[in-house]
Amino acid sequence: MTVPVYISVEIKDAAALSVRDVRRIRKAANRATALLWHRHYLRRHFRPGADVKYGYPARSPKYLDRKRRRASRGHYVKEGGNAPLVYSGLSRSRMMRPPTIRAYPTRARVDMAAPSYFRMTPRAGKHPLGRQATKVIENERRPLTAHNAKETERGINATRRTKKTRV
């Protein structure tokens, strides 16, 4: 499951760095940003009230009643049936496992294990659970961008300090 978060950071004074150094720095910054998203922002999608915060389409009253009734009976429903993406907890537990992060100079890809019913492109009449679980809203995008810029700056400063010159 790929998470699309688009971040653009300009590197000023990049002339002092080689193209290889810039790519390495960008790759490390994108990896750190993807890891931050997975550790801190993904879990918010599985909390009660996330449907309002992230703008998920409303579930049918019949589905919500069935979910809450099963939760009240002690069946396999987590969070009392109030969390929008959590029914048995399978999706949350699988997606919160350590991901495989593939970082590139222009982007990072977060690969997570998810149940088969979590699809990025939904079937007819089904909710796009994959898109809903990975949605990034504007007030999350700003801290992610700031983190990426900070990691990029940290990489630039570390590269400048360790620059070796042959004589």
Image: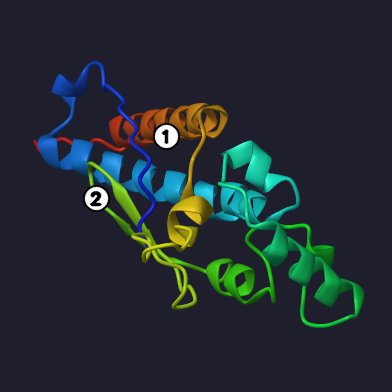
Quarter of the rendering containing residue 85: bottom right
Q: Could one spot residue 68 in this view of the protein?
A: yes
Q: Farthest residue to the front: give it.
A: 62
* Lateral position of residue 35 relative to residue 93, left or right: left
Q: Is residue 134 or residue 39 the one in the foreground?
A: 134
Spot the residue most to the top: 13
Quarter occupied by residue 16? top left
Q: Residues within 10 Å of mark 1 (few under 14, many from 20)?
A: many
In this picture, residue 163 sits left or right of residue 57: left
* Element type at mark 2: loop
Horizontal and vertical percent for residue 93? 63, 73
Q: Considering the numbered disc 1 on the image, is that residue within a helix, a strand or a loop?
A: helix
Residue 78 visible in image:
no
Residue 38's spot in the image, x, y percent? 53, 54
The residue that label 1 is drawn on is 148
Residue at (35% x, 46% y) in the render: 4
- The image shows residue 49 at horizontal and vertical percentages of 73, 45
Residue receiving disc 2 = 104
